[in-house]
Image: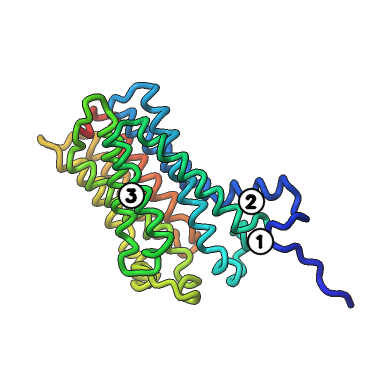
Amino acid sequence: MGAPNRTPPGSAATPPYRRTVGLLRACHPGPSAAVTLLATGLARSAGQDTGGCLRVAACVLAGQLSVGWCNDAVDARRDTAAGRPGKPVASGAVDAATVLAAALAALALTVPLSFLCGLLAGAVHLVAVGAAWGYNLRLKATALSWLPYAVGFGGLAGFVALGLPGNPRPTWWVVVAAALLGVGAHLADVLPDIGMDLANGVRGWPQRLGAARVRRLLPLPLVAASAVLVLAPPGPPGTVGLIALAAAAVTACAGAALSGERPRAPFPAAVAVAAIDVALLLSSGATIV
């Protein structure tokens, strides 16, 4: 009996179209698109014009692509050892060197695109992207794994505000709400893989808590983010705000409750809560500055 015919990851024998699809999948297209759309919606809610919204979208998308590709390049050896078929590098669709090169190219493109949105705004965005790279390279496996998410999401809100004409400062409650959303997104993203992460020696904050505790904790930062947006601005909360808060609570709790049967459910629920918050800003006329 001959040896099994296995194609090395990303080898020349891999069809070009498969390598291209693998590279696109390695950028984490769902989260990248979600963050880009949410940032663009936030910019629109702040009164940014069409050109400004396009600059925000291009800048954030480039940064998110760099982060997604960096994540898969850094985790390539671990994903391959664990035999994770959902990961393009582990499945042999694309090689780690190609993914890393794409990450560096996207990061290089992020720099000029960031500064097209303004000097101060660009600097804040690069800090947010740098925090995400720090998560991939080191902080992912530490008790501070939540921090890059808080800095990244909070910085994204600051970036959008500072990119407006006159570089106005963002209101504190929008930055705090965005940071809380980031912490919730971290918990939701990691929850399905906690068992595998522990087996591979990854001990970030959620892994140290364990799946059961994360499942119970997950709705809290998401609902807290919505509560800050509704209750922190001056004046009594309006009917729209209270309805949005209730919808966010139901969505967050439903995502956590479904995680037992559908492990990936918490992340789209977290994105939905963020969308509710952006819609709240759009419908209530609230401002992020």
Above/below status of 224 relative to 241: below
Instruction: Name the spot of residue 29 as percent of width and height, x first.
Output: 53, 46
- Secondary structure beneath label 2: helix
Please name the amino acid that badge 1 sits on: Ser
Disc sitting over residue 128 in the figure: none
Disc 3: which residue:
152
Quarter of the image that includes the C terminus: top left
Please name the amino acid that badge 3 sits on: Gly
Instruction: Name the spot of residue 152 as percent of width and height, x first.
Output: 33, 49
Instruction: Name the spot of residue 2 as percent of width and height, x first.
Output: 87, 75
Disc sitting over residue 91 in the figure: 1
Q: CA distance from mark 2 to mark 3?
A: 26 Å
Q: CA distance from mark 3 to mark 1?
A: 30 Å
The residue shown at (31%, 46%) is 248
Q: Quadrant of residue 217?
A: bottom left
Please name the amino acid that badge 2 sits on: Gly
- Is the residue under label 2 in contact with that under label 1 (CB below 8 Å)? yes
* Along the viewing direction, whichever of 225 and 44 lies nearer the viewer: 44
Disc 2: which residue:
22
Residue 112 visible: yes
Above/below status of 257 relative to 232: below
Residue 280 visible: no
